[in-house]
Image (tube, grey):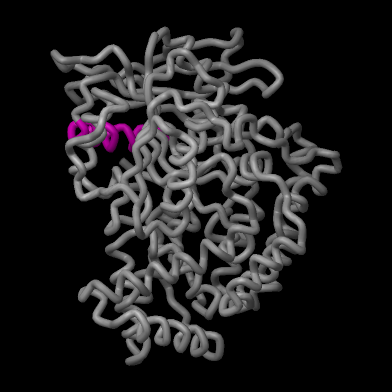
Amino acid sequence: MKVKLIAACLLAGLLLVLLSTITERRPSPVALVDIDAGVRWVDCWFDNTWDLNIRCGQLTTTGEDGRFTLAFLVFESASAERRPDPLVYLAGGPGAASQVAADQVENWVYWLERADLSRDFIVFDQRGTGRSQPQWGCRQYDRFARRVLASAIDLEEELRRGAEVLRGCWARLARQGFKPDYFSTRASAGDVLLLMEQLGYQRWNLFGVSYGSRLALAVAARRPAGLRSAVLDSVYPLDKGLVSEWPWLLAHALQRFWHYCGVEAACGVGAADLEALFWRQMRQLARNPRTFTVSSWHGRAPYKVVVNDQRLLSIAFSALYDVYTIEKLAGALQGLERGETQLLASLTETFTNYALEPGFNSVTYFAVECADNPPVSEASYQAAVQAFPDLAAYTESAWRYDVCPELAAGTGTSWRPPQLAGAGGGLAAHPPMLLLSGGLDPVTPPEWAVELAARRPNSQHLVFEQIGHAVVSSSDCVHQLLRAYLDAPGQPLSLDCGGSPP
């Protein structure tokens, strides 16, 4: 199962390139169907060479949230123990690459073999992603992102130029009929409910990863009668994601890095020494940036990337998603101390290819995040910055370049981010929920799931200390745990896979 980890970030400012790569969307072979809201079964757009029945369809939405056609797949279970309640997967992002593309189907088939769910599995492309229609994109920002990675401009100038390009894109899209308020977690929650109503399942379960967990919570806030249970992996609650949380997220992620390496011999350096080493290399790269040429994983020409201090911070944050790259990051810092750059070049290649992934649609990303998250005052943001003074040089400008007010201004309209219904603490305890957190996760930290679990008595929360972002994709054992929970949601799990309550 492929999860778009980098797109799940909630950050603004420093990781603008990492989070927000906008690509021109090519016309999809899925055409809009002139029917009322509902499901239409279609011939699959791939050859089914697996011993598994896969049904392909299109969901057409209508109403105040706009008209979209969303492609979906139903993987029908052939198990003699087939349960009647399917599992519906909600992808991360928002703006993740297609979940139903031909080259993704094989990944799902392999994942289902490992998970052994004994129930149907449903996956779809959310509005503004993959094979959904209509779509909007901005090639100008794609070009800007590639140019800025190849330059050593300072952070303030990088943020200023990025915001300028985004304003121009947003204004052009508005003239083409783009309505940002059609893209929100509230709107996508309605799509999930419509899909399940049209498919006719009486009871069903949700499995959301990263942003998908937020979408699952928005569906649950509607109190649908058919929702039997939900598994939330790398939990992104409805009341998180403000720009003022960025300084804490960054500082907390780095502190977890120091702590992990302080107790794991694999890093080869203690916590205090590693922290000092990191800041030495930040200062060194600020004075003397390194330039790398790295391969594209997407068939493009090689990328030129200049790694200065701000870029090292971005590369380090992205590396903290996974325990294997965490250990490589420690090695890269030690290598730099000796004048060796091979490991840093490898991490730079990974970072760059995630940042410039063609399938990720940041028009959708920005529209959804801006719709979901209200603005914060400059005073509250600066207070958050001053709580972590070592990072202030890299966080203090983010509020001025918060893209949501910029994009709203670019439309020439009075659009403002609406609040999500049910975002407060009064969420009902039903349905049962399993919350999974990686102890090393930099962007959806376990603390967020702890707060959510305290408001939901009918939930279980497990923390896997040696895992980063996206727990299920990091452990074969957790696949078995997923099946065990779905078979008896709400019951204590006897299989813990190394996870423990916080």
Q: Quadrant of residue 373?
A: top right
Q: In the image shown, does 180 or 439 lie closer to the viewer?
A: 439
Q: Which residue is drawn at 55% across and 38% down?
A: 26
Q: Position of residue 62 (x, y in %)?
A: 64, 16
**Does 388 sit above or below residue 223?**
below
Q: Is residue 100 magenta?
A: yes
**The N terminus - image quarter:** top left
Q: How many marks?
A: 0
Q: Residue at x 48, y 49 (%)?
A: 448
Q: Can residue 100 be seen in this view?
A: no
Q: Where is residue 349 in the image (x, y as percent from the top left)?
A: 39, 66
**Does 73 sit above or below residue 268?**
above
Q: Where is residue 219 in the image (x, y as percent from the top left)?
A: 52, 26
Q: Report the side of 130 relative to 274 (left or right).
A: right
Q: Quadrant of residue 112?
A: top left
Most common secondary structure along the magenta stretch: helix
Q: Position of residue 387 (x, y in %)?
A: 61, 71
Q: Quadrant of residue 486?
A: top left
**Does 49 sit above or below residue 374?**
above
Q: Residue at x 77, y 38 (%)?
A: 174
Q: Give the range drawn in magenta.
A: 99-115
Q: Which residue is drawn at 44% across and 70% down?
A: 254
